[in-house]
Image (cartoon, rainbow, N blue to C red):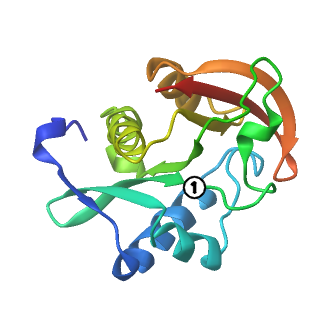
Amino acid sequence: MKVQFDDFTIEQCVPGHLDAILEIQNEALAELPSVDVLRENTLQMLEECLKPPHFTIGAWYEGILAAFSVLYYPHDDKENLALHLKSIDVAGLKTANNKLCIVRKDFRGNSLQYHLGLILEHYAKDTGIELICATVSPKNQFSENSILRLGFTYDSTLNKYGFERNLYYKYI
């Protein structure tokens, strides 16, 4: 379904949106061509993403959550993607992760990952973040295209979350 971005209602997601987010994740996982394209986030992780300092943004169309995207502020080395960067020195930089974006099937093709990514970037910049990192499955061409369109730079390919992932970064 083609929809102009201005016709979506964009709001920050809160814990009350958890069921809708789980529904979108489950729909996406059920239709994947391969299990390694998208990691299933746990209920606990998604709950965490809906609470500060993390920032989750949603796009609604006619009352339906069409997409959501997560900016994650890592609090330990396990989730800190910047520590895996090989091509740049991140010492002293305040970093965050463009962690996850899922767009409902009916709303794909509306550049929602791109538009929500821009919103995450502005929010990150406003909170003092200097570098954003993201991982994308090399089998997910749509997400790779969105990340590149957002101006991210490829760093390396690594095994993360038990799957092969391309690691990207962007100075903001």
Q: Where 64 falls versus 31 (above or below)? A: below
Task: Classify residue 73 as left or right of residue 91.
Answer: left
* Residue closest to the eye, 168 or 37: 168
Residue 17: quarter of image: bottom left
- Name the residue beneath numbered marker 1: 73
Find residue 129 and report its horizontal and vertical position in percent: 49, 40
Query: Does 156 sit above or below residue 82?
Result: above
Relative to 13, is 97 on the left or the right?
right
For residue 147, above or below residue 71: above
Q: Position of residue 46 (x, y in %)?
A: 56, 70
Looking at this rendering, what residue extends furthest in the front direction?
92
Given residues 61 and 155, the one toward you in this image is 155
Image quadrant containing the N terminus = top left
* For residue 167, side relative to residue 43 (left or right): right
Tell me residue 67's x, y (percent).
37, 53
User: Residue 5 lies in what quarter of the image?
Assistant: top left
Q: Residue at x 79, y 17 (%)?
A: 87
- Which kind of residue does numbered mark 1 sit on? Tyr
The residue closer to the viewer here, 151 or 68, is 151
Residue beneath the point at 46% across and 27% down: 172
Residue at the image point whose x is 52% and y is 22% from the top? 145
Q: Secondary structure at mark 1?
A: loop
Instruction: Count residues near mark 1 (Cα–Cα under 10 Å), then give few for <14, some for 14-19, many for 20+.
Output: many
Number of residue marks: 1
Q: Name which residue lies at 62% across and 37% down.
A: 134
